[in-house]
Image: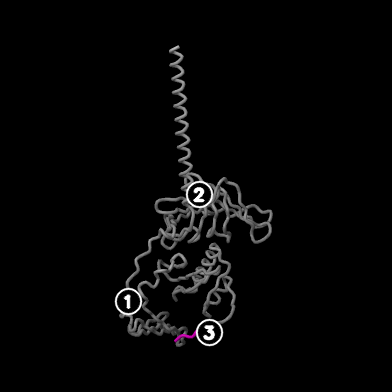
Amino acid sequence: MNAAIAHTAKYKRALALLATLGAALAALTSSAQSTQANGLRALDGEWIYVEDRTEGRTLEQLGPPMSSKFSLRVEEGAVVLASGHGSGNRNVRVALDGSATEVPGSSEGTFARYRGTWKDGVFAYEVEFVRAPGKAPEGLIRRDFRITPEGLIVRFTSVSPSPWVGLYRHPQDIAMPAPAKAAIGDLAWLAGAWVGTRGTNGTTSIEERWSPAKGGAMLAVSRTVSRGKMGAFEYLRIVGVPPNFLARADPAEYHVLVARLDGANVATAMAFDLDGDCGIYNVGTLEHARRRGLGTALTALHLHDAVARGCRTASLQSTEMAERVYAAVGFRDLGRILEYVP
């Protein structure tokens, strides 16, 4: 009788131990699932490019592995590619079980096919393109997204076997640089005439004549003369602004591109979106770097990024000298603007 009782007690203890281990295992599984879910939710929101993390790149090669700004939205069992993921597609719902999502293209029988996974803290998706009815997919692109203490690491792989890696952060997590303190008086050295020559035997002269700093501003006129003929002239002005002039400006809304030549910045272009239109401004190239396609390349890149951001149109104002540059990337003339300069 006592042996039977002892055996029963051991059996109960064994059941109790088994139940305890089962509860612990369930708790660990639940905790792991919760951690995975939290990691996935961390992808949600808007992300801004911070720096290139690709190994072995020179300064001239640095840049974002995808759009400089993109958005993700996390849903049950899927991640939505809200904007900035290329191809002009927005709000693409990518399931995490590897099943395909097909987005129709601009012509019948064409589409982009997306597949996604979430594994070991990495959200990854692949997209391939069917560009003609009945044709095999091509142009496979893969992007991996991993949350780290520094921010979101994006890894891009395409035709090239070498990955392109970039660091992104939420806008609120990007520290703004301390504004530089400056006053018009700091530019007093600029007052006077500045004259230089270039070309064979100095055939081209460039002049700028600046007034003294006064009344919070400096004014100037400039001209470029080549072989006895004036090729360009400008009215210039430097104006002081209040210290908090840009306090409410969102730097993420301004898209600035710079082209470099022989290690130096030689061309730039800026874009700003409004109501689905990408406005392109301040496209300029230093004189010695012109006729190399830099202005065209920057403009074309802005258009490419604008499509990824969801813009439907783009607009700009052009000088006569630059009209051919913009026509080459698809702009057309909508009319003339008369601008009066004091």
**Alpha carbon separation for disc pair 3 and 2:** 52 Å
- Between 157 and 57, the one nearer to me in the picture: 157
Q: Residue at x 56, y 82 (%)?
A: 336
Q: In this rendering, is residue 123 above or below 245?
A: above
* Residue 242 tag number: none
Residue 183, quarter of picture: bottom left
Residue 186: percent from the left, percent from the top? 30, 77
Q: Is residue 311 left or right of residue 251?
A: right
Q: Is residue 341 magenta?
A: yes
The residue labelled by disc 2 is 123
Residue 149 appears in the rendering:
yes
Query: Marks 2 and 1, how far apart in space?
Result: 48 Å
Neighbourhood count class around disc 2 (C-alpha, 10 Å): few under 14, some 14–19, many 20 upward:
many
Residue positioned 54% across, 55% down in the render:
81
Task: Read off the magenta span.
Answer: 337-342
Give how far across and how far down residue 206 sits, in percent: 40, 82
Q: Amino acid at mark 2?
A: Phe
The residue lying at 43 percent from left, 63 percent from top is: 60
Q: Secondary structure at mark 3?
A: loop
Q: Disc number at residue 338?
A: 3
Q: Are marks 2 and 1 in contact (CB under 8 Å)?
A: no
Q: Residues within 10 Å of mark 1 (few under 14, many from 20)?
A: some
- Amino acid tagged 3: Leu
Q: Which residue is mark 1?
A: 183
Q: Secondary structure at mark 1?
A: loop
Viewer can see residue 201 = no
Residue flagged by tag 1: what amino acid is it?
Answer: Ala
Q: Quadrant of the N terminus?
A: top left
Q: Earlier in the sequence, mark 3 or mark 1?
A: 1
